[in-house]
Amino acid sequence: MAVTVYTTGIHCQQCRLTRLRLEERGIPYREVDLTADANAAAREFITDGLGYSEAPVVIVDGEPENHWSGFRPDLLDLLAGRVAAAVSA
């Protein structure tokens, strides 16, 4: 299970809290900074494709229906439980 976090850089408080929660729960993730020019295609996917206007956007790869925006500790904790169960299996 791969997790991608689309952020708006180091000054985004919700992005920072999301990264921190993932790290505390031991969930590996890939970060994509949507403010970087090189990530214009990702920015278009997040805004036009998925319709989000708030960062961070968390996507659980392989599960296209499993994504959300904003700092969501409830969903991050559910994800941590799923990751722990997958590791135990």
Image: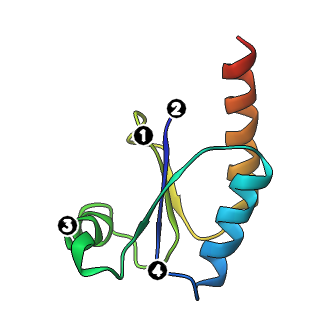
Query: Residue 36 at what x, y percent from top left?
Result: 32, 79
Residue type, label 1: Asp
Mark 2 vs 4, N-terminal side: 2
Q: Residues within 10 Å of mark 1 (few under 14, many from 20)?
A: few
Q: Residue 72: give its label.
A: none
Sequence-wise first label, 2 or 1? 2
Q: Looking at this view, is 63 or 22 the one in front?
A: 22
Q: Tell me the amino acid under the disc marked 2.
A: Met
Badge 3 or badge 1: first in the primary sequence = 3
CA separation in Å, label 4 and label 1? 20 Å
Q: Quick one: label 4 or label 1, which is nearer the N terminus?
A: 4
Residue positioned 74% across, 43% down in the render: 26
Q: How did the renderer colour the structure? A: rainbow
Q: Earlier in the sequence, mark 3 or mark 2?
A: 2
The amino acid marked with disc number 4 is: Thr
Q: CA distance from mark 3 to mark 2?
A: 23 Å
Q: Which residue is mark 4?
A: 8
Q: Are marks 3 and 1 in contact (CB under 8 Å)?
A: no
Quadrant in the picture for residue 72: bottom right
Q: In the rendered image, which residue does mark 2 sit on? A: 1
Q: Which residue is mark 1?
A: 61
Question: Decide: marks 2, 1 in contact (CB < 8 A)?
Answer: yes
